[in-house]
Amino acid sequence: QLDGPEALTLIEANKKDEAHRLHVEGEIWVRRNDLVPLRITLAASNLEGTTAIREEANVNYTLSPYGALLPALTEHRELRAGNVTAENKFTYANFHKFGASSDIKFEVEK
């Protein structure tokens, strides 16, 4: 979205590129003492008539034992005319810290 009152444009390829202008609202939940994000919520909606669309998503975050902020859970729901048409839940766990190193050597011919 470049400008205008709508915050998001949804284009449906399976419906001849039909465009829906969606209003977006959400929240960012942070930890009080250091403002680290704990949850981000998002709701995008166009609630007009029988083509009413609402997309909802939540992402919960956690700090890894290595100090990195990582997603722990993502939930998504799509509603059309008030009926749930899609629901997804992703859980992330068992994060591992990986390390790598390399050397670059140049040999000069004499």
Image (tube, rainbow, N blue to C red):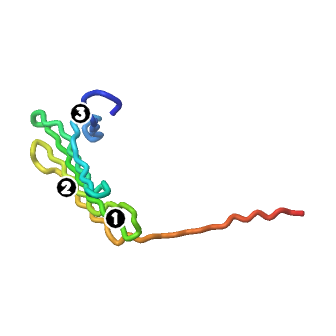
Identify the image quadrant of residue 93.
Answer: bottom left
For residue 21, the mark is: 3
Residue shown at 19%/55% (left/top)? 87
Q: Nearer the viewer, residue 36 or 68?
A: 36
Label 3 environment density (alpha carbons within 10 Å; few <14, some 14–19, many ≥20): some
Q: Is residue 105 left or right of residue 30?
A: right
Up the image or down, 8 lies above or below 97; here it is above
Comparing 85 with 61, the one in front is 61
Mark nearer the N terminus (3 vs 1) = 3
Which amino acid type corresponds to the residue marked 2 in the rendered image?
Glu
Relative side of 4 to 56, left or right: right
Report the residue at 20% width, 48% height from top.
56
Percent x, y for residue 71? 32, 60
Q: Three-letter amino acid code at disc 1?
A: Leu
> Picture quarter containing residue 20?
top left
Tell me if mark 1 has few (under 14), some (14-19) or many (20+) residues whose alpha carbon lies within 10 angstroms of its own: some
Label disc, if present, on residue 87 of the rendered structure? 2
Helix, strand or loop under label 3:
strand
Q: Nearer the viewer, mark 1 or mark 2?
A: 1
* Image spot of residue 78 (x, y percent): 18, 48
Could you tell me how far apart the alpha carbons at marks 3 and 1 are, in whole angstroms?
35 Å
What SS does tag 1 mark?
Answer: strand
Where is residue 85 drawn, in percent x and y? 16, 50
Give the residue at mark 1: 63
Name the secondary structure under disc 2.
strand
The disc, 1 or 2, on the residue closer to the chain's N-terminal end is 1
Q: CA distance from mark 1 to mark 2?
A: 26 Å
| Residue 89 found in image quarter | bottom left
